Amino acid sequence: MPSKTLPTWLQLLAILLVAWLLKTQLFGHRGAGASSDDWTPEQIHALAATVKAEEVVMYTTTECGYCHQAKAWLNQYGFAYTECNMSVDSRCE
């Protein structure tokens, strides 16, 4: 039976995609010089309220620690997103 482990390049691509989505959602509204220190938790929650689940697709794997961290952060601030776990659903690949 073939292994369900994804190639390293595909895992890296998923991580980079998540990082880019977070950056554009958070800092794209504030300009190039904004950092996370410039945002209060209330502002992040307010931004999260404007995001629809169909606007953010997070490609994850079961084994990806960074994916778990990113999901925890999104959940902490109430961001809606659609998760596509490539370890579980072959349609995500």
Image: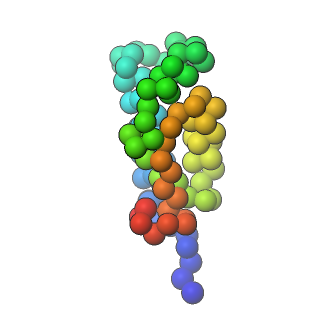
* Left or right: where 69 falls relative to 57: right
- Residue found 59% across the figure and 54% down from its top: 64
Q: Quadrant of the N terminus?
A: bottom right
Q: How is the image coloured?
A: rainbow
What percent of the width, then of the height, locates residue 91?
41, 66
- Relative to 84, residue 16 above or below: above
What percent of the width, then of the height, locates residue 54?
40, 43
- Relative to 13, residue 71 above or below: above
Which residue occupies the extreme bottom position in the image? 1
- Residue found 50% across the figure and 27% down from its top: 48
What percent of the width, then of the height, locates residue 27?
42, 23
- Relative to 22, residue 87 above or below: below
- Relative to 85, residue 57 above or below: above
Which image quarter: residue 70?
top right
Viewer-proximal residue, 79 or 7?
Answer: 79
Q: Quadrant of the C terminus?
A: bottom left
From where the camera sits, is residue 76 visible? Answer: yes
- Residue found 57% across the figure and 48% down from its top: 67
- Residue found 56% across the figure and 78% down from its top: 3
Viewer-proximal residue, 23 or 56?
Answer: 56
Total count of labels? 0
From where the camera sits, is residue 73 visible? Answer: no
What percent of the width, then of the height, locates residue 74?
57, 35
